Image (cartoon, rainbow, N blue to C red):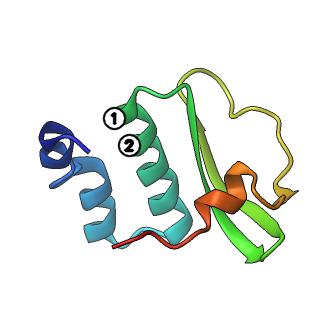
């Protein structure tokens, strides 16, 4: 992450404001996903959680234009696939 991007994330105003207001976790997660997607200039962004080693679930999704793509809420995690690699622990 560049210093500029890291500096911008020192306090994303919308997310910090919502956190201070004590909004529902779902609303905070939606706002965070939108901020990340916008900061990265992405067409869409999502946050996923892992139900098990071989199943994941989309927790929230954001799209720069229009609704989030019509994708399943749950999917299989295939060995060696991108979702499998994303679940690996980071090396220190």
Query: What residue occupies the far bottom of the structure in this picture?
Result: 52
List the residue tagged with mark 2. Answer: 35
Say left or right for 87 vs 91: right
Disc 2 and disc 1 in contact, CB within 8 angstroms: yes
The image shows residue 8 at horizontal and vertical percentages of: 17, 43
Give the CA separation, mark 2 to mark 1. Answer: 6 Å
Instruction: Classify 10 Å Cα crowding around label 2: few (below 14), some (14-19), many (20 and above).
Output: some
The image shows residue 42 at horizontal and vertical percentages of: 49, 28
- Secondary structure of residue under mark 1: helix
Dividing the picture into quadrants, the one containing residue 26 is bottom right
State the residue at coordinates (62%, 67%).
87
List the residue tagged with mark 1. Answer: 39
- The front one of 39 and 79 is 79
**In the rendering, which numbered label is found on residue 73?**
none
- The front one of 25 and 43 is 43
The image shows residue 3 at horizontal and vertical percentages of: 13, 43
Instruction: Classify 10 Å Cα crowding around label 1: few (below 14), some (14-19), many (20 and above).
Output: few
Say left or right for 27 vs 55: left
**Residue 18 sits above or below residue 62 on the image:** below
- Secondary structure of residue under mark 2: helix
The image shows residue 82 at horizontal and vertical percentages of: 69, 50
Say left or right for 14 vs 6: right
- The front one of 48 and 88 is 88
Quadrant that contains the C terminus: bottom left
């Amino acid at each position: 992450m560049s210093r500029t991007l890291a500096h911008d994330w020192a306090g994303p105003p919308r997310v910090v404001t919502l956190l201070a207001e004590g909004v529902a976790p779902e609303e905070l997660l939606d706002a965070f996903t939108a901020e990340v997607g916008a900061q990265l200039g992405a067409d869409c962004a999502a946050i996923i959680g892992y139900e098990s080693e071989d199943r994941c679930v989309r927790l929230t999704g954001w799209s720069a234009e229009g609704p989030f793509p019509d994708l399943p809420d749950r999917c299989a995690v295939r060995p060696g696939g991108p979702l499998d690699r994303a679940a690996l622990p980071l090396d220190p």
